[in-house]
Image (cartoon, rainbow, N blue to C red):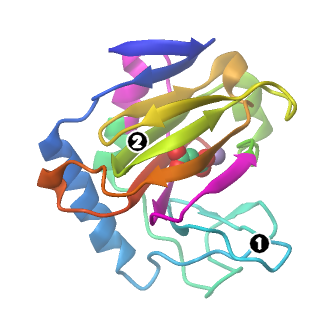
Amino acid sequence: MNCEVAPSAFLMEGYLTIEEQKGLILRCKDLGSEPAGFYTPSMRTGAYMNIQMMCLGLHWNAKTYKYENVRTDFDELPVQPLPQHFKEISRRIAADVGMAIEPDICIVNFYTGAGKLGLHQDKDERPETLKKGIPVVSISLGDSCNFLFGGTARKDPVRTILLKSGDAFLFGGPSRMCFHGVSSIIAGSAPAELKVSGRYNLTFRQY
Ligand code: SIN
Ligand code: MN
């Protein structure tokens, strides 16, 4: 069921089957254990983020907030390519709500039970992409989380949305610059069949 939580921001509950979820988790684990796999980003302040991250297609530099081909803020390794199969899933999600994305980037975040992500905007993609409102497409796998979704100003009211394994969420159009974050992970809430602990989140972006 698709629910438009704000203009052009959609929650698509239960979008992926358990088999699709298993396949994506396996792929994330495989890619994540490659040399240019998961790592813990440190920010401009020097503090570490409360998540592990792996970028595909283009690397998001947590110090400069720019995209690059090589992980210059971490280990200088070239970023791994974005698998064709991943691209297709994100295109399909966008098309299902009448939107379009030509993804170049997937940022895969892994959250343990203590993981969280502060309120922020996704604004490091090309200005044309932001201006056109091309959506960010997000897929959640494993443990559920409390996802925060606000308005285009930091002070705007924020709602909490439960994102569960297999849910897709997308925000584009006038909601593309909405503040969002993850306040908590619900440890142990992943479907038993997935045999996973922690939460994977994939966000697809058009550079
Ligand atoms: C993000 O904002 O980049 C990730 C959001 C999420 O983990 O659901
Ligand atoms: Mn974000």
The residue singled out by tag 2 in the image is 139
Residue 131 drawn above or below residue 137: above
Cα separation, mark 1 vs mark 2, equals 24 Å
Taking the spot 69% from the left edge, 80% from the top edge, the residue there is 72
Task: Decide: few, some or many residues near mark 1? Use Cα within 10 Å; few <14, some 14-19, many ≥20.
Answer: some
Q: Nearer the viewer, residue 137 or 129?
A: 137
Is 9 left, or right, of 124 in this rendering?
Answer: left
Give how far across and how far down residue 38 sits, in percent.
Answer: 47, 75
Q: Specify the segment rendered in magenta.
A: 90-119
| Place of residue 170 in the rendered image (x, y in percent of width and height, measured from the top left) | 51, 29
Residue occupying the point 46% across, 45% down: 145
Q: Residues within 10 Å of mark 2 (few under 14, many from 20)?
A: many
Q: Quick one: SS at disc 2?
A: strand
Residue 166 appears at what percent x and percent y?
A: 29, 38
Which residue in the protein does label 1 denote? Answer: 43
Q: Is residue 136 visible?
A: yes
Confirm or reject: label 1 Cβ below 8 Å from ligand 1: no
Tally the marks. 2
Secondary structure at badge 1 equals: loop
Q: Is residue 175 above or below residue 115?
A: above
Q: Is residue 58 left or right of residue 56?
A: right
